Image (cartoon, rainbow, N blue to C red):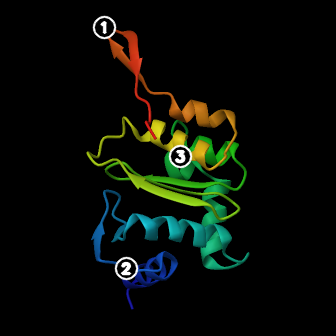
Amino acid sequence: MCIRDRVGEVVAEAAGEPVAAIGTDGCGAPLMAIGLVGLARAFRTFVLAEPGTAERRVADAMRAHPEYVAGTRRPDTWLMREVPGALSKMGAEAVQAVALPDGRALAFKIDDGSTRALGPVLARSLELLGVDAPVVSRIGRAPLLGGAVEVGEVRAAF
């Protein structure tokens, strides 16, 4: 069995749904098509996996070294650094998944694929889950500029 097929099996099992298609992302890694509920379920599965399992080792490695997940200036890194036990990853076309250490998880996609609203939607979602940390405000800040002057902001309205 090739690695791509094995990754697909693991993702399907963690998501609790079949992988609809397998592609390749911009980095050359296998890209698994699953629904948003399945994506949230998969993140939850990895966070709650027993210590020592492959799933838990992946989650622990991401949380221990978030700069390898998202660089140093992105919300995923900030969230994993500042909310103990959080697992977070933004994907292509404004997909976001997060799992908290107690198993609460979320996944969403900004329909037009633009990342402009991603931070405000993520911050509001975290607020609704009861995450009370300064990083939430930082993630949610999305000023709109006009002539290099702040004239408004993007806000989540839910």
Q: Earlier in the sequence, mark 1 or mark 2?
A: 2
Residue placed under numbered mark 3 in the picture: 125
Estimate the spatial distance between the alpha carbons at disc 3 and disc 2, rounded to whole Å.
Answer: 32 Å
Residue 96: x %, y % from top left: 45, 52
> Would you say 129 lies left or right of 39 here?
right
**Residue depicted at x 65% and y 65%:** 103
Residue type at mark 3 is Ser
Residue 4 is labelled as 2
Which of the two discs, 3 and 1, labels the residue nearer the N terminus? 3
- Which residue is located at x 60 percent, y 42 percent? 127
Single out the mark in the foreground, 3 or 2: 3
**How far across and how far down the image is residue 109, in percent?**
37, 52
The mark found on residue 147 in the picture is 1
Residue 47 placement: quadrant:
bottom right
Q: Quadrant of the N terminus?
A: bottom left
158 and 150: which one is in front?
158
Contact? badges 3 and 1 (CB < 8 Å): no
Q: Quadrant of residue 138?
A: top right
**Is 27 located above or below residue 93 in the figure?**
below
Q: Amino acid at mark 2?
A: Arg
Q: Secondary structure at mark 3?
A: helix
**Label 2: which secondary element:** helix
